[in-house]
Image (cartoon, rainbow, N blue to C red):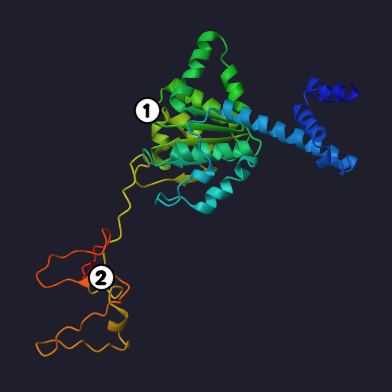
Amino acid sequence: MLINQTVDKPHSLRLGGMAHALADQLEHPDRYGELEFTARLGLLVDRESAERDNRRLTRHLKTARLRAPACVEDIDFHRPRGLDRTQILTLAQAGWVTEHRDLLISGATGSGKTFLACALAQAAIGRGRKALYWRLPRLLDEPRLAHADGRAGTPLASWARIDVLVLDDLGLRPLTTAQAADLLEVIEDRHQRRSTIPTSQLPINTWHDNLGEPTLADAVCDRIIHTGIRIELRGESMRKPAPPTPRPALSRPDDPRRISLHARPGARALPAAPTGPNHPPRPVAVPAHLPLTLRQPGQPRRFCSPRCRTAKHRRVRS
């Protein structure tokens, strides 16, 4: 009875991992019986900590609403896109999030901007950070709807608390003055406090011309371009199927790999068999225990077995 109460109490204290570990120790006394009290208590604490970390990671991934289930391990470094493996692996450590720096990703359509941004955001989530994905055209509609509902500052306040904010498709369409002002509020709330990942099809040097009113564009670009880490992708679209791998071409007759050992330079050549009317072909000696006969001249060619299709096998079964 006391054991049952001890097992049930961790559940009431929201210590599910510790309760599961305790039940496991009670079910397998031969496995844990020789351990000391401190060692068994350490196993309970480790189990509870691991399950809490897993739940936190699952919750953060769900609330991040990343566009693609990407991770750094799935990034393709083989295609020539201008990606630096060392730089990406360093960014995966999320040190730039701790320093409150921004990542500026640009590239043509299909170059992998969204996938790369989501992969780095997921790496930051794995380090205990919070992330959120938004397409910029839809994000800029939220403040307008919030003004109509009377909750103007609610979306901006919630976005300001996110450690990594992914703004996809920056400059996809021209911004109005009101949208540029809302974008400036988002960037200003996060400048040197949080990290932002804007992605765009436009080159980074041309962002200023596509952010609406010049004064607001100056303010936005001044806060993200000068201190941001640039990643400029190039190359063909990743959505385009990769060309099939070509099969190795057959070697030519004069290929050294097809020349026999005796025909190679430096090898001792075998004497050629004499030919002519004065040198008839030598008879083939067939052991007596093999029921094989030679093919007579004019007789149709047959083979020793259905699978044997080699022309040099001139012996057939009797």
Q: Amino acid at mark 2?
A: Leu
Q: Quadrant of residue 32?
A: top right
Residue 206, quarter of the rendered image: top left
Image quadrant for the N terminus? top right
**Residue to which mark 2 is pinned:** 292
Q: Is residue 126 left or right of residue 139?
A: right
The residue carrying mark 1 is 173
**Location of residue 261 in the rendering, given as x and y in whole percent from the top left corner:** 32, 80
- Can you tell which of label 2 and label 1 is closer to the viewer? 2
Q: Position of residue 66 (x, y in %)?
A: 52, 31
The percent position of residue 3, horizontal first and vertical second, equals 87, 25
Residue count near mark 1 (Cα–Cα under 10 Å), binned few <14, some 14–19, many ≥20: few
The foreground one among 244 and 136 is 244
Real-space Cα distance between discs 2 and 1? 85 Å
Residue 15 is situated, as x and y percent measured from the top left of the image, at 78, 27
Residue 262: tell me if it is visible: yes
Identify the residue at horizontal 38%, vertical 30% (top origin). Answer: 172
Q: Residue at x 11, y 90 (%)?
A: 278
Position of 316 compared to 7: left or right?
left
Q: Secondary structure at mark 2?
A: strand
Q: Earlier in the sequence, mark 2 or mark 1?
A: 1
